[in-house]
Amino acid sequence: MANVKLTDVKKIYDKNVVAVHDFNLEIKDKEFVVFVGPSGCGKSTTLRMIAGLEDISEGTVEIDGEVVNDLQPKDRDIAMVFQNYALYPHMTVYDNIAFSLRLKKVPEDEVYEKVTNAANVLGITEYLMRKPRALSGGQRQRVAIGRAMVRNAKVFLMDEPLSNLDAKLRNQMRAEIILLRQKLDTTFVYVTHDQTEAMTLGDRIVIMQNGYIEQVGTPMEVFEMPTNLFVAEFIGAPKMNTFKTKLIEEGGKYYVTPFGSKIEVNGIKGDMLRERNVKSQNIILGVRPEHISLAENGGEDTIPCTLEVNEMMGSELHLHVVTEDGSHLIVRTPTVDLDADARRELVYGKKLNITFEGKVMHFFGEEDNRNLLV
Amino acid sequence: MSTLSSTERTAKRHMGINTSRRISNTAAYTVLILISIIWLVPFVFIVLQSFRVESTWQVGYVIPQKWGLDNYANLFKTDFPRWYLNTFIAAVATAVLQTVIVLCMSYTLSRFRFKMRKPLMRFMLILGMFPGMLTMIILYRVLKDLGMTQANAVPGLILVYIASSGMGYYVSKGFFDTIPKSLDEAARVDGATRFQVLKKIILPLSKPIVIYTILTAFMGPWGDFVFARYISFGTSSGMNVAVGLYNWLNRDQIANNYTMFCAGGVLVAVPVTLLFMCLQRYYVEGVTGGAVKG
Amino acid sequence: MTHYSDLEFLKLSRGQKIGYKTASFFRSIPIGIANFFKKIGLGIGKGCKAVGREIADIGRTFRDGDIHTKMSFFIMGWGNLARGQILRGLMFLLFEIVFIGYMVLTGGYWLSMLPTLGTKGPVKELDPILDVFVTKYYDNSFKILLYGVLTLFFIAAFIYTWRVNIKQNKLAEQILKSGKKLKSGREDLRSMVDDKFHKTLLALPMTGIIVFTVLPIVFMILVAFTNYDGTHDGYYSNLFTWVGLDNFNTLLGWSSGNKAYSAAFGEILTWTLIWAFFATFTNYFLGMMVAMLINKKGIRLKKVWRTVLVLTIAVPQFISLLYVSKMFAKNGLINQGLMSLGWITQALPFWEDATWARITVILINIWIGIPYLMLITTGILMNIPQDLYESARIDGANAWQQYSKITLPYMLFVTGPYLLTSFTGNMNNFNVIYLLTGGAPTNPAASTAAGSVGYTDLLITWLFKITTGAESKYYMASVVGIMVFVVVALISLVVYSAMPSIKNEEDFQ
């Protein structure tokens, strides 16, 4: 149980490829922090630098107030779960979990107790004498977690632990990790490329791209107030709709004019624009698919478009529509809002009118792609 | 009518598949049997001739007119047992030491990333382009000064065999490369030193390549002719089997020793071949992996 | 040459496509070689700069260092001892003492004699007590050259260690300044099995390689510039000395005198390349065919066929090859058998006629070589994804098309590097040639002063013959050895520069 502090951490591979730029972050004791981003963004590299599996080119990593740059992984008191589980194939599940304890010369009866305890918690007691190759993916994952659990380490590192599992199992294991976190009550650093995992697991999320931190915040913060276009598009599924348009200020009111319409920015977003006294300008407008609704009739605040694809997801529909100038948008609408007849009509080529929810729009600068309200 | 003819045609087509497979398989078997004969004939001949008693020189027939173990008995009146022992000692020592050296080298090059790694590998690649025989002259002179030639050739030979064996790291490095690195990393996070990683994780997983390395290292000295001949030069008691038996086929010795050569060859080949056949599986793994990795 | 874009290339006719590919293949060779030398040049430039930086750093360390650091410039390990790193300090100190002792006692002598390789050879002198002439031995060129090289290696090692010693002082100062502790001797020892484990592991193999490969090769390269041979063995008879490039000129025919060596070299090099080509490709294709035959669906007893073939790998070559060599001899089994059957009246000249001998060694090499290729290709054939064949069959490919469009490209791709090593390996395939023919039949035209040269001699067997021949012309042997290196290096360079795909291992995965 400890805090982790990264100060100006940099990773430079030979030939001057910079994988991580000036990474600054303080992870509090018992906090669950998730690094998320597309592949190659430097999230795993950062985690491996905390673990001591990669050299730190510049900057310092502190665990519990101690600079650990020059410490070997074994001396950092960390536990880690790997993407491909990294179970020792020649050892039984029991030996796998006991490995670290035995290296520390823990007495055998204590080893027995700790291993069986961990196995109990994870529900793998009946597999203790099996070799990893005789286990399913989910069971292997549990063993890997068990191996890390018995360490009682200061920091618990997880490198994409769920990405080798199928979708159903992944959901189940995600819930178990939340439970585990309650039980272990220690500091977690978790790496994933999946924004859903990041949103559901993290106390705080660190969104990275090309070696830079784009935003750090709670799941709610990054969802409601993304600092830039990248974060806005990365968080949330289906992806946020973004397109170039104009923001106009007219007599104390703000309007956006996407695709020839004119929609008022009301609610909290309108207030914020007024507070900051934002000028009329060209912007990139971001609207989440759930904030687009179907309008009964046309009007100034609606946009005419044509339905291309209708994805029936069960509780909701994802409608892929094309505007008259050829832009593609996704509309997410709850199934219950439409009666059976209306649903049946939603087929390829159907003409629709859509409108945007003014109070939950996002505005980004056309040049720097930064959120105008941050 | 037309449906009938169509089913007929279908039947014929199906017949076609079966017959053509039968024909091609018959052809394949014929070729394989022919190949097997070609491959086996010399070995069968050598065994048959080792039992020939009526004459010791080359003759135009294969099956002995008089069978007996005379040739084998005669072997023990020569230096052959000494040669055999020399070779065996060299082979065992080489197998042990060379395996240790090769594994050290290949494990390091597979697992550690240090500044000199790439230059080192490139350097060894270039070094390997020089014919090893070139160094024979100086090695002989140096070993002679150390008193490890002629009658004492065995320790000298062992030294020569193992000294540069680090350069033959390719195959086992290729194998180590296939063991996921995350296993090392997991073990290091679990608290293992690099040495413990090698001992507790990598070596238990490397049985095939260890056996392959031991096998090839053991077989090398049985076939070495060049260095053994040069280092034991002129002294019968320092020779290995290859040199000793080669000399029996010299123009002036062949008439007396041809059948004895066959007997000696059988005595050398049988244990080595049996060992090889038992461990064939590992050999195949090593050879295949090595070729693919280049 | 015009360069086509991908789309333009696709529009070309089949013939044009082949022509374009061939042209760009050959064009890439000089470019690749030029790049290689450019890289070497850049490397040398970088190396010089690095040396400059090192010297500057050494100077700075001296200027800025404390008294212990300064003392360490003269007494290695001083700084370590003063700062409490006893183990390291003692090691450094010991090394310096050994080095100075060596240089004073013998190293200086060897080094001073290196330019002449000795001036006073063995002389018959009158022993005043016994009153007889005895041979007195003085300088020994062989030892001078050997220990001279060794001393140079030792000096290089000393300079490197001295540099490490200084670097450590600088580092120790920095660490102490930042308030941290230095590593103790015990920690040093522990790091030998942990973060410095690779150095521990490499120590033994690298020592072996340096002493038994690098040092001898450097020595033998130097021999190529001397007149070291059986009559100048440097001690018992005459001293040897430096002769410059004379030996290279002789071998390459650039000297006005004896042309025998250059003639023999040309002959042997040509045959070596022909041999390597046929030995490699006959084995490759026949081995692949046998592997496919055994792997064929419906063939039973696969294991038995393989085991029979593998016999030639298992049985030591000197037995199988010597025996087969005698089988094909003039009075061997085959000739005698055929004659007693009445099929021939005269013995076939397997080893007596140049062409017969050359073809026979290639054929027997197939017998030795196919099993290796069979094993290798079996492994690779099984790795080819079956769905490639299934998709090809659905697309309408027949057996030959499946082979030429899927199997062969895949094989060539995967075994490209292997083909190269196997080619150079065959160039140096001493055993097969020496045990089968010993180089015979003799080539009278090339054999004059260059000793006995045969039609089946490879460069490597020639090297062996020169070394062990009556005159023991070591200097020629070492020139031939260097030539083997040059040829192998050139071929590797050409292949690697012309086929960049060899290095892209990912394409087929």
Image (cartoon, coloured by chain):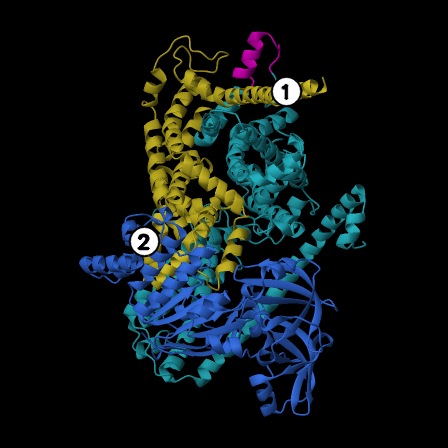
In which quadrant of the rendered view does residue C262 lie? top right
User: Is C332 inside the magenta-drawn segment?
Assistant: yes
**Residue C456 visible in the snapshot:** yes
Of the two numbered discs 2 and 1 on the same chain, state the one appearing first in sequence.
1
> Which quarter of the picture shows residue C259?
top right
Where residue C277 sits: x, y (%)?
A: 63, 37
| Residue B135 location (% of width, % of height) | 49, 46
Chain of the residue that carries numbered disc 1 in the rendered image: B
State the CA–CA distance, disc 2 to disc 1: 62 Å
Residue labelled with disc 2: B200
- Colour given to chain C in the rendered image: cyan
**Amino acid marked by disc 1:** Ala
Foreground residue among C87 and C5: C5
The answer for which chain carries disc 2 is: B
Where is mark 1, residue-wise? B11
**Chain drawn blue in the picture:** A
In the image: residue C333, left or right of residue B147: right
Taking depth in this image into account, of A158 and C356 the one nearest to the observer is A158
Q: Which amino acid is tagged 2?
A: Lys
